[in-house]
Amino acid sequence: MAGFLLRALPAARILIITLWAGSIWTVGYLAAPTLFSTLTDRVLAGTIAGSLFRIEAWLSLACAALLYLLFAMEHATPSRRVCQRLVLAMALCVLIGYFGLQPWMAGLREAAGPAGVMEGAARTQFGLLHGAASLIYLLQSLLAVLLVLKSR
C-alpha cells in the first residue's frame, strides 16, 4: 500500500499543477475577457468576473497547500525546492492580489453605488488598484508556467 502511495504522489502532483495553472489561465485570459466583450452591462460583467476570481483564489490556496505538502513528501532535490518556492510565490500573489487588493476595490465599488465605480470620483484609485491586481495576476500566471516546466 505504501509503495502505491509513493508512486501515486507524482501523478497527483501533476494533476494538481495542471488544474491550478489551467484554472488561472482560463479564468484570467478567457472567461473574464469574454464576459467584458460579450455583455453590454460592464457592472454585471465585473460582478460575474469577480465571482470567478473569488473561486479561483480559493482554488489557488487549496492547490498551493496540497502541492506544498506533496513536494515536502518527496526527496530533497534542487528542483523540488524551486517548485516549493514557486508554489509559495504563487500563493503570495493570491494573498496580495485577491485577499489584499480585492477588498479595497470592493469597498470602492460599494461606495460608488449603482452608477458603478468607473463613473464616480474613485475611478482613478480603482484603476490603479485594478492595474496592480492585474500585474500580480500576470505574475502568478507566469510563475504557473515555470511551475509546469520545472515540475516535469
Image (cartoon, grey):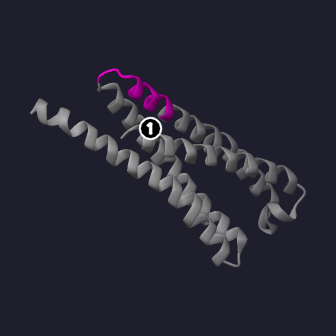
Tell me the quadrant of the picture where the N terminus can be found: top left
The reply, left or right, for residue 8 in relation to residue 68 is left
Q: Residue placed at 43% from the left, 37% from the top?
A: 150
For the residue marked with disc 1, what is the amino acid?
Ala
Q: Name the residue under label 1.
A: 64
- Expressed as whole percent of the image width and height from the top left, the position of residue 7 reads 18, 36
- The magenta span reads 75-86
Observer able to see residue 62 = no
The residue tagged with tag 1: helix, strand or loop? helix
Residue 41 x/y as whole percent:
71, 75
Q: Is residue 40 above or below residue 146?
A: below
Tell me where residue 122 appears, x and y as whole percent.
Answer: 86, 54
Image quarter of the C terminus = top left
Evaluate whether residue 85 shows in this view: yes
Which residue reaches farthest left? 1
Asked whether residue 77 is drawn in magenta, I would say: yes
In the depicted view, which residue is nearer to us: 96 or 25? 25
Q: Residue sitting at 66 percent across and 39 percent down?
A: 100
Q: Does the magenta stretch include residue 29?
A: no
Tell me where residue 94 appears, x and y as whole percent.
Answer: 57, 41
Which image quadrant for residue 39?
bottom right
Report the residue at 77% width, 67% height from top: 114
Residue 145 falls left or right of residue 103: left
Looking at the image, residue 68 sits to the left or right of residue 74; the answer is right
